[in-house]
């Protein structure tokens, strides 16, 4: 684990409520908290949701229940023009800008911005045409896996493997499966894709987190795995880092009580900063896995350990028995591991009680 550093994504998402001013403030909050990346969402509401699309329960609870999903999304859209201002401000603040596209037009727009990476949300894990377009573009990708089975994740990775491979074979289920079995295509996939385990509920109950799934995906797919956290508080993200998450994504808001679908499952800036600090401490604590005394504890070895010492005054030439020697601090003399080898030997000089042998 030497040098392990978690990539921390502050998910601003739609917590700007369509306001560029608020979005810029979220960039500042993410940078001030020490996040590596600030992430938004890029979509066209009419392309994303049909007229009959209903809201999730958590969206019903946190927005006008009589409003359609499309109407809600229209209020939360981030215009393409705003992206340029946000990217410039993020660059000024020394933080990476990232966004999640939810439709083909939005993906093509983000690709035109030449961002370091693209994030695809859990809702599009089964959206093969969108995944294939990302891969054909050769983009570095973070893919969330909420709501998915291991088999569905594998199917998505097959689509991506086919896209990254540059295969001339037309896209099809058979072609995707063939690419997944192709070692060369798999290697190209591994150069571009990281997975995020998550549970698509806002907020997510701790009992539904299932952090052990990170290890299952890492083992199954041999790809970097992280965690997208929708729980209250920071402790689940910290546990994920301790379990080896390479990426942590957590929602950031300026006000958890604000109206909107994601505020309640977000952290306010002070708590986000506390999470970042705690993650960095955990990274330092993970160490290199070599069990050996650390620099800070070496000086305490003679203080805390014991040596073999005389249990009573001894004359020169006495044959030592169990009642003649014992172990006491400090640990600067013979190690207690030698206790039994000293039994039956003769002293070569006199000893006072507590003298090290």
Image (tube, grey):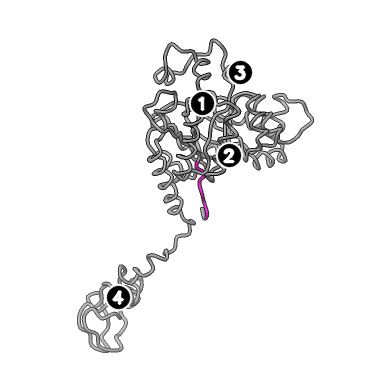
Considering the image in quadrants, where does the C terminus appear?
bottom left
Whole-Å distance between the Cαs marked 1 and 3? Answer: 22 Å
Between marks 3 and 2 in the image, the one whose residue lies nearer the viewer: 2
Residue 219 visible in the snapshot = no
- Farthest residue to the right: give it: 168
In the rendered view, would you say 56 is above or below 192? above
Q: Which residue is mark 1?
A: 147
| Nearer to the camera, 36 or 24 | 24
Whole-Å distance between the Cαs marked 3 and 4? Answer: 79 Å
The answer to whether residue 284 is left or right of residue 338 is: right
Q: Does label 3 or label 2 sit earlier along the sequence?
A: 3
Magenta stretch bounds: 3-8
At 45% across and 39% down in the image, what residue appears? 29
Indicate which disc residue 308 carries.
4
Q: Does label 3 or label 4 sit earlier along the sequence?
A: 3
Q: Which residue is mark 2?
A: 88
Q: Secondary structure at mark 2?
A: helix
Query: Where residue 356 sits in the image (x, y, percent)?
Result: 29, 79
Between marks 1 and 3 in the image, the one whose residue lies nearer the viewer: 3
Q: Which residue is mark 3?
A: 47
Q: Does label 1 or label 4 sit earlier along the sequence?
A: 1
Query: Where residue 255 sits in the image (x, y, percent)?
Result: 39, 31
């Amino acid at each position: 684990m030497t040098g392990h550093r978690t990539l921390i994504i502050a998910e601003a998402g739609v917590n700007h409520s369509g306001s560029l001013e608020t979005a810029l403030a979220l960039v500042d909050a993410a940078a001030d908290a020490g996040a590596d990346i600030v992430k938004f969402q890029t979509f066209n509401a009419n392309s994303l949701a049909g007229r009959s699309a209903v809201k999730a329960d958590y969206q019903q609870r946190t927005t006008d229940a009589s409003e359609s999903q499309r109407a809600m999304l229209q209020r939360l859209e981030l215009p393409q023009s705003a992206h340029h201002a946000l990217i410039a401000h993020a660059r000024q603040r020394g933080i990476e800008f990232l966004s999640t596209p939810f439709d083909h037009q939005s993906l093509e727009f983000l690709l035109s911005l030449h961002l370091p990476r693209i994030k695809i949300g859990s809702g599009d894990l089964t959206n093969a045409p969108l995944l294939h377009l990302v891969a054909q573009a050769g983009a570095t990708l973070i893919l969330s896996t909420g709501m998915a089975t291991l088999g569905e994740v594998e199917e998505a990775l097959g689509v991506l493997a086919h896209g990254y491979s540059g295969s001339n074979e037309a896209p099809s289920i058979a072609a995707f499966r063939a690419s997944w079995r192709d070692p060369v295509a798999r290697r190209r996939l591994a150069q571009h894709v990281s997975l995020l385990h998550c549970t698509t509920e806002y907020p997510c109950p701790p009992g539904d987190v299932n952090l052990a799934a990170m290890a299952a995906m890492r083992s199954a797919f041999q790809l970097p795995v992280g965690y997208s956290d929708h729980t209250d508080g920071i402790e689940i993200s910290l546990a994920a880092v301790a379990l080896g998450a390479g990426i942590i994504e957590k929602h950031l808001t300026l006000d958890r009580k604000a109206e909107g679908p994601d505020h309640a499952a977000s952290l306010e800036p002070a708590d986000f900063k506390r999470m970042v600090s705690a993650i960095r401490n955990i990274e330092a604590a993970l160490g290199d896995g070599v069990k050996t005394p650390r620099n800070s504890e070496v000086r305490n070895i003679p203080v805390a350990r014991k040596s073999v010492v005389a249990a009573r005054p001894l004359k020169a030439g006495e044959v030592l028995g169990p009642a003649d020697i014992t172990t006491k601090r400090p640990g600067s003399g013979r190690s207690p591991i030698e206790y039994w080898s000293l039994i039956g030997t003769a002293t070569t000089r006199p000893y006072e009680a507590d003298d090290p042998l």
